[in-house]
Amino acid sequence: MNEGRIQQVDVKNMTVLGAGTMGHGIAQAAISAGINVVLYDVAQEFADKGAAQIRKSLGKRVEKGKLAQEQADATLKLLRTSTDLKDAAKDADFVIEAVPESLDLKKKIFAELDKICKPAAILASNTSVLPVTAIAGATERKDKVVGTHFFNPAAVMKLVEIVMPIGVVAETVETAMAVCKKMGKVPVRTKDTPGFIVNRLLGPLYMDAAQMVLEGTATAEDIDTAMKLGAGHPMGPCELADFGGFDVIQMAQDAVFEYTHSESAKLNILYRKMLEAGRLGRKNGKGFYDYHPDGTKTPFKIFG
């Protein structure tokens, strides 16, 4: 990161690309902080669904007495949706991309944004596993590209990893830090290495938990109970793996292993087998647990 006089960009208008779980959560946090947001997706039905989730979430806060109806109404006025990328991004001071975890897709979008956005606009990726330096490489503004890795649910979770790719300047990083703080988050800096901070540290825990299930040391349910009550974790490793998604864990572990060549980073065979069986975690209701429409879950019997 190049050092120099630090002058942050004044962020009044934000564009969030992708109205899914992460995207609409990020958008909610931004409008709740008084930032104008355009929530973009490729189809209006997806954008509308994301906006509806934000309205629902704010409505629940009103019902619980945590937010006045007038405040909720004023907050929602800061949000609009779009399915036209140029319309969505041309006036943005800060863009956060939250599309599916495909490097080719992200590079394509960033190349387009580079042509659409104002020269001073900062482009951020919410990727949890992909190299931000490679994403920045698709643009001519490598000094203004940064990673902003939010955690699910993004409207609630405080942590954001500010990922610093090669070529980024201090102004960009400090602006990202300031924007996240304005959104009520606690940002931490990390270099652009596989897994960043959290996923790199969580990886060995995920792998050991899967190995214990595989060899019959303990059930996923008992492992989760032990870590919640014995280590003070809010969620056990199997529950957390379900929450994150086995496909995302696979990408993260493969990237970390390629970088570190550490045996502890190797993806446990159980995750590969679960993916082969079509079990992705909570995102499709099938992981270490089966998730039911009534909100309950039951342990999955892996081997019958």
Image (cartoon, grey):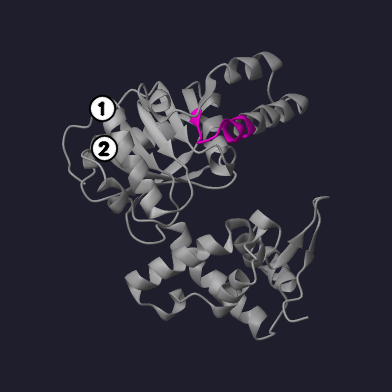
- Magenta-colored span: 39-49
Q: Is residue 46 magenta?
A: yes
Q: Type of residue at label 2?
A: Lys
Local packing at callout 1 (Cα closer than 10 Å; few below 14, some 14-19, many 20+) is: few
Residue denoted by label 1: 120
Could you tell me which residue is drawn at 39 percent across and 33 percent down? 95
Which mark identifies residue 245? none
- Can residue 255 be spotted in the picture? yes
Judge from the rendering whether residue 204 lies leftward or rightward of residue 139; answer left or right.
right
Q: Is residue 133 left or right of residue 148?
A: left
Q: Nearer the viewer, residue 46 or 200?
A: 46
Judging from the image, what secondary structure is the residue with disc 1 in?
loop
Residue 263, image x, y percentages:
42, 81
Relative to 304, say whether 252 is above or below.
above
For image coordinates 36% across by 36% down, the residue present is 176
Crowd band around label 2 with a 10 angstrom C-alpha radius: few (<14), some (14–19), many (20+): many
Q: Is residue 232 left or right of residue 129?
A: right
Q: State the residue position of label 2.
A: 144
- Residue drawn at the location 59% of the way across and 69% of the way down: 275
Q: Amino acid at mark 1?
A: Ala
